[in-house]
Every structure is written in C-alpha cells, then in structure tokens.
Amino acid sequence: MKKSILPILFCAPICFGSVSAQTNKAFAITSETKGTIQWSAVKELDLSTGNVVRSIFSPSELKNITFNFFNEKGIVSTNISNLNNPTQNGVAATAYDAKHNRLYFSQMWGNDLRYFDLNSNELSVVINQDINYSTGIRNDESNVITRMTFASNGKGYAITNDGNQLIQFTTDDKPIITNLGALIDSKKNNGISIHNQCTSWGGDVVADVYGNLYLFSVKNNVFKININTKVAEFIGAVKNIPTNFTINGAAVDANGDVFVSSAISTENYYTINLSTLEAKPVSKSEATIFNASDLANSNLAYQNTLAKPILDQQIFNNNISVFPNPAVNKKFTIQFNKIANGNYNIELNDANGKIILSRKVIINGLQSETISLPKGVSGGLFLVKISDTKGKNYFSEKIIVQ
C-alpha cells in the first residue's frame, strides 16, 4: 500500500467459491488536491484510463458520519458525529471486500482495522479495535501496515513495512484477526530480503487465483508470497518504469495486469504484466493523474487464464457435493447421494486446465470420497469433474484449496 514518509524510507524504497468477473474499477487513497500528500481522500478510478469516476470520501466535505466500534464481543457502541474524520491520521493500507461491498483500511498512526460500508446511503464507518490488529508503536515506521488485500480464500491480509507481521482477518459477523508472524525469505532471494528497508518496504500487495500474494515494494521490487508457508520469493524488479516512479498502490485490472500508482509522481499510471514484469504507461493525459498512496479492488491475477473450454462444460448436479469450500490442509470431500450405481472417474484440474489427479471410484449408494492434493502441488483454484466410463460429464465445480 504505501510508503508514506518517503524521504525517510528511501535509502539511496472475495470469499470466493466461484470466479467473479474482473472489473476496471478500483479505489484510490489520494489527497484532495493533486500533488499533495495528505492521504485522507478516497476516489474511484477507471483503470482503463486512470480517470476519477467519483469521490467516495473527502475530508473537506465532512457530513454526519456513523461510527460503529467493534471488538471481539461485537459492536459495543455507536456514535454519530460531524466532527471526526475517519482518515485523519492518513491511510496507509486499503483493501476492497466485494462480497460485503466494504472498503477496509488502516490509518498510518493507528492500531485498529476500519472499513467504509459502501452499502449505506449515509457515510458509515466500522472500527474493529481487536488487540490482535495492533502491531506495536506506530511512530516506529517498521510497525506501520502499508500493504493490504483480499486473497482468493476470501480473507484479508495486511503486512507491516518490515514484513515481520502478516495479519489475517475475516469479514463475517464475528471477525477473527490473527497475527501470523513474520514473512520468511526464500532461499532463492539472492540477498534481497523482504525485510530490507531500502529494497522492500512500502508499496502494495495484490492476490492471484492460486492463493498467492504479490508484493510490489516502493522501490519497484516484486515478491511472491505463499500464504500458507509465509515464504516470500523475490521474482524480479519492474522493467521499463521511470526511475522517479515509486510504486505505492497496486490493483489488478480487467486484463489481468497490475495497475500501479505513485505517491510522488503525477506524470502517469502504469500497468505491469505479472509474468514478465514489463511496465507500460496507461494515459498520456497528465491532468487525469493523481498521486495515490494506495489502490484496491477485488480482481485476482491470472483469473483470465482459467481454462474456459473446461469451465464452460460445467453440469451441476445436486446429488453430488464438494466441501468444505474453501478447503484446508490440502484436502476436501466429495459426497455422492442418489447417483446411479456404477463406475465413475474423479478428475481434478488446476486453473490452467492441467489434470493433476485422476481417480476411478465405484459408487454404490450414499458414499464419500476424500481427495488430497498430490505431493508437491500447492493450493489454489481447482476444478473438480466427475464423469462416467463413457466420458459423460456428470458434475463440475470450482474449489479453493489451501
């Protein structure tokens, strides 16, 4: 998300059980005036052009705001005020929860998790004061949460500047906030540590359909993070981007590229191909460019690479169910109920359509089969297919496996 006090940090930088459509909209944390650095305004951008679509929140236009304060026991108090600014300490990280239409955020110098309820006709903010979201003294920049996103498992993830605290949060009626601890440097990083202030602080993070996170640091370095192992692998630096452009905000656009903004540059936005790390400018109209400290939307990287011929063949059958979804510990259950007795084939495809498991089963009444991912296969988005011996497809369903 950002690296807000840039001079100090520079050293020489959806629960989703089904795939939703990608959009070209994102929320941006900006200032009210282009070129300034009070990260307190929220705007909606069209990622195809970089143009501002609408203003979500502007401190100078404060109206009555409903504040709901929430802790582990639930909502404990409600206050309506026209004096308080929910972003007054600057927003360091934001993430969009499409399932509930909420924009989550952290203040730079605060220790609570907040969200704008975008379903409300009036301005409404919910503040979660769970102690598990506290990362320590926030005047220590290493403790500031500067990166946040929602992963393919529907959970939110927030990362401190120094990478020593990865926080997971849920969005249900009784949200659970868990500090998962420090990210771990991959052995492949060649000395570029996820914890290094000069190379890896600040920036933003996006997620892909396979359950990974991609952290773009303010110095334009990219790390791939496995949520389950917390291993952060340096995969390269962004190419063809101006030397004066710092990556502070990132969001996946409708084409599957990563749209990035800078907190200090108002010359242009850029899109980055996640496979090649090649950057391209978005717009030639400087007037449309706001410097932005953070971006957020619900798109996932590589979502457009899903094997459409396979997905289009889906035949849903209420007599077969797959659970839990998302699955944990790399295993899930298929239950057969009232399906004709006989021989069937269970097939598991990854998001690219590759068959990673095939099993023949004999069904004779009510029956359950436990499926485990093969050794060496990481979690992610998969397609379960069940067919008969003649190849007729009886059932298809997408599942997230962690």
Image (cartoon, helix red, strand yellow):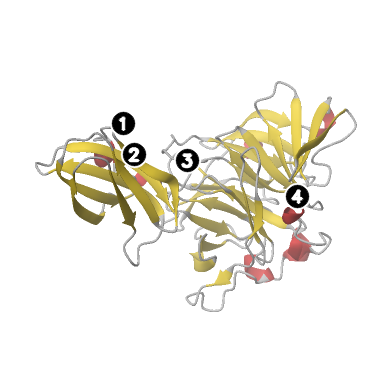
Cα distance between the residues tagged 2 and 1 = 7 Å
Can you say whether 158 is above or below 231 in the image? above
First along the sequence among labels 2 and 4: 4
Q: How crowded is mark 1: few (under 14 residues within 10 Å), some or many (20 or more)?
A: few
Q: Name the residue under label 2.
A: 321
Label 1 amino acid? Answer: Asn
Residue 130, label in figure: 4
Question: SS for tag 4?
Answer: loop
Label 2 amino acid? Answer: Ser
Cα distance between the residues tagged 1 and 4 = 40 Å
Eye-nearest disc, 4 or 3: 4
Residue 123, image quadrant:
top right
Q: In the image, what residue occupies the spot 77% across and 48% down?
A: 112
Residue 318, label in figure: 1
Quick check: can you spot residue 3? no
Q: Do the residues labelled 2 and 1 touch (CB within 8 Å)?
A: yes
Q: Mark 3 points at which residue?
A: 16
Label 4 amino acid? Answer: Asp
Q: In the image, what residue occupies the spot 54% across and 65% down?
A: 230
Can you say whether 164 is above or below 253 in the image? below
First along the sequence among labels 3 and 1: 3
Q: Do the residues labelled 3 and 1 touch (CB within 8 Å)?
A: no
